[in-house]
Image: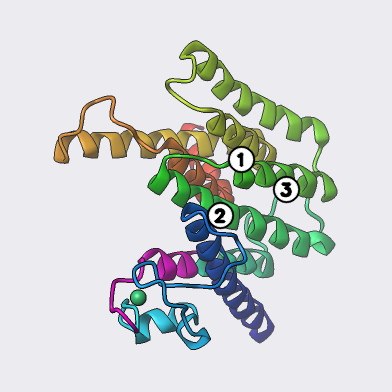
Amino acid sequence: MEIAFTWIALAALLGIATGSLVNAFVLRAKRGLPLMSKNTCIRCVEPIAWFDCIPVLSYVALRGRCRKCSSAIEWQYPAVEIAISLLFALFAARITFGIGIPDFVDSSELWILFVRDAVISALLVVIFLYDFRFSVIPDKFSIPAVCAALVFNLLMGANPFAVFLGGLTIGAFFSVQFLVSQGRWIGGGDIRMGLLMGFLLGLPLGMVALFLSYVGGAFAGIILLVWKHRRIDSHVPFGTFLAGATVLTMIFGAGILEWYLGLIS
Ligand SMILES: [Zn+2]
C-alpha cells in the first residue's frame, strides 16, 4: 500500500514538472520566442529568478504577481501544473490498483501504459489550451500524439486491425464533414484529433469520447447563446472539447461504457 502511494506521489511530482514545461512551451510559442529561451515577465520583460519559477509554490508565494512590476502572472501557470499533476497521479493510481486496464496490456507492460497516458495527456492539455485560447490545434502537438497512440498501442500488443479500424472510422467521420462543409464546420486539426481518439481508445471507447465532446460542445454553445448573447454561428473551440473528452474517456471511459451497457440491457 505504501509503495502504491509512493508511486502516485512521484507521478504527481513528475506531472507538476511536466506542467511547467508545457506552460513554458505554450506561452513561448505564442509570443514567438524560441522554446529554450529564459523565463521573462510579459510586462516588464525582466528575467525571472529560479526561486520565482518553482511550480505552484512561487505563484502562491508571489500572490500571482510579478516580483518586480507586480503585473498579474497568467493563471494558466498554476492551473496547468495542477491539472497535469492530477492526471499523472490518476494514471499511476489506475495502474497500481489495476482499474480499467485495456485488455491487451500485460501486467509487465503497465509502465508502458503509464508512459503512453502521460505523454498523450500532456499533449492533450496543450491542445485543450491552445484551441481554447488561440482557436487552433497546432500540428506540432497533434501529430506526435497520433503517432504516440499508434506506436504505444501496437507495442503493447493491441490488435492492429482494431487500432486502425478505430482511427480510420473516427478520422473518416470528421473527414466527411470537412469535405461536405469545405472546411467551414471543422478543420484539418479536428481530423487529426479523430485519428488520435480512434487509435488511442479503439472503437467503442472512441465513440464514447466523440459523444462526450459533442455533448460538451452543444452545452457550451447553449451557454454562449443564452447568457452571453452570442450569435448561433459564433466559434466554439471544438478541439478543446475533443481534447477534454479524450482525457475523460482515458480515465473514466471503461466505467461510462459499462454503465451505459447496463442501462440498455
Ligand atoms: Zn514584471
Circle 2 SS class:
helix
- Residue 129 lies, with reference to residue 198, above or below; the image says below
Residue drawn 38% across the image and 67% down it: 42
Depth check, front residue: 251 or 81: 81
Using the numbered discs, state the Cα–Cα distance from disc 2 to disc 1 in whole angstroms.
Answer: 24 Å
Res. 6 image quadrant: bottom right
**Chain-order first, disc 2 or disc 1:** 1
- Residue 47 as seen in the image, left or right of residue 9: left
Q: Which residue: 49% across, 69% down? A: 81
Q: Residue 12 vs residue 223: left or right? A: right
Q: Identify the amino acid type marked 1.
A: Asp
Residue at the outermost front position: 45
Q: Residues within 10 Å of mark 1 (few under 14, many from 20)?
A: few
Q: Which residue is mark 1?
A: 139
Q: Can you tell which quarter of the image residue 225 is in?
A: top left
Amino acid at the residue labelled 3: Ala
Q: Measuring 68% from the left and 65% from the top, which residue is drawn there?
A: 95
Is 70 colored magenta in this rendering?
yes
- Distance of label 1 from label 3 (alpha carbons): 14 Å
**Which circle, 1 or 3, is nearer the viewer?**
1
Kindly check if marks 2 and 3 are in contact, taking CB atoms under 8 A apart as contact.
no
Q: Residue 212, percent across and down?
A: 45, 39
Q: Is residue 172 above or below residue 69?
A: above
Give the colour scheme shown: rainbow
Q: Residue furthest top?
A: 180
Which numbered tag is attached to residue 148? 3
Q: Amino acid at mark 2?
A: Ile
Q: Which residue is mark 2?
A: 251
Closest to the observer, 228 or 213:
228
- Viewer-proximal residue among 183 and 103: 183
